Image (tube, rainbow, N blue to C red):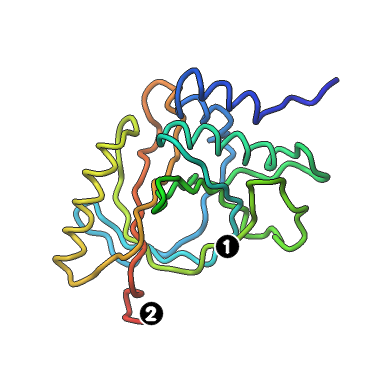
């Protein structure tokens, strides 16, 4: 029996229903989340400390919805074993999307902490394997259906909260997705990440 082309399915679905359909593949009940330490929690805002995280990523262009749909298709193909040897790679949540200076979006899937990225088969064109460094990240939830306006509003609120505490974030916000918009309601709110300029203890 021919192997299902998840990337092709997701890309087609995204074209029909924007980025929401691209989340179909997310196996939420079995998905893992990376371990982190919560350094501060206050009034709905948090600062978390994450270890170095291996990622598979792709840069895509167009609207946020289109970039997400196309990026998810490419990355899901690799995660589900299309075009490479080996088993499927377990889903790790959240899926990250970061806006780029040239108008594109960098879409990232997190790889399991116990996975040796050096042993992975190189992905195809337009996809790469890399790492996010250990870092402290300011976090706020973004409840409801994801939208550019909702993410922008919450980013401004998070920046004001950081400024009031003498903290700053220099990198672009990262959207962190946990839910499938095709499923009625939301089981978990999505989040917005702002990596801090310096660790909470003052180290760069």
Q: Position of residue 139 (x, y in %)?
A: 32, 55
Q: Please give the name of the residue rendered at 61% of the width and 60% of the height, measured from the top-left corner.
A: 130
| Nearest to the observer: residue 97 or residue 43 | 97
Residue hosting label 2: 204
Going from the N terminus, do you reach mark 2 or mark 1 first? 1
Find residue 54 and report its image quarter. Answer: bottom right
Q: Do the residues labelled 2 and 1 touch (CB within 8 Å)?
A: no
Q: Residue furthest bottom?
A: 203
Q: Please give the name of the residue rendered at 46% of the width and 29% of the height, measured from the top-left corner.
A: 19
Q: Position of residue 89 (x, y in %)?
A: 69, 45
| Nearest to the observer: residue 120 or residue 45 | 120
Find residue 201 and report its image quarter. Answer: bottom left
Residue hosting label 1: 131
Q: Position of residue 190 (x, y in %)?
A: 37, 41
How would you rate the neighbour count of disc 2 (Cα within 10 Å): few for under 14, some for 14-19, many for 20 or more? few
Q: Please give the name of the residue rendered at 60% of the width and 34% of the height, measured from the top-left corner.
A: 73
Q: Which residue lies furthest to the top in this view?
A: 16
In the depicted structure, whether residue 184 falls above or below residue 162: above
């Amino acid at each position: 029996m021919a192997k299902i082309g998840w990337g092709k399915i997701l890309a087609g679905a995204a074209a029909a229903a924007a980025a929401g359909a691209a989340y179909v593949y997310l196996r939420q009940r079995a998905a893992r989340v990376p371990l982190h330490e919560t350094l501060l929690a206050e009034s709905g805002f948090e600062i978390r400390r994450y270890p170095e995280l291996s990622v598979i990523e792709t840069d895509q262009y167009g609207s946020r919805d289109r970039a997400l749909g196309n990026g998810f298709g490419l990355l899901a193909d690799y995660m589900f074993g299309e075009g490479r040897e080996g088993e499927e790679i377990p889903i790790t949540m959240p899926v990250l999307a970061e806006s780029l200076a040239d108008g594109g979006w960098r879409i990232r899937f997190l790889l399991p902490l116990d996975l040796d990225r050096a042993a992975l088969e190189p992905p195809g064109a337009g996809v790469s394997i890399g790492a996010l460094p250990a870092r402290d990240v300011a976090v706020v939830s973004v409840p409801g259906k994801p939208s550019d306006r909702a993410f922008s509003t919450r980013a401004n609120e998070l920046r004001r909260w950081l400024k009031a505490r003498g903290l700053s974030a220099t990198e672009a916000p990262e959207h962190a997705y946990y839910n499938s918009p095709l499923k009625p309601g939301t089981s978990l709110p999505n989040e917005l990440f702002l990596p801090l300029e310096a660790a909470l203890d003052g180290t760069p």
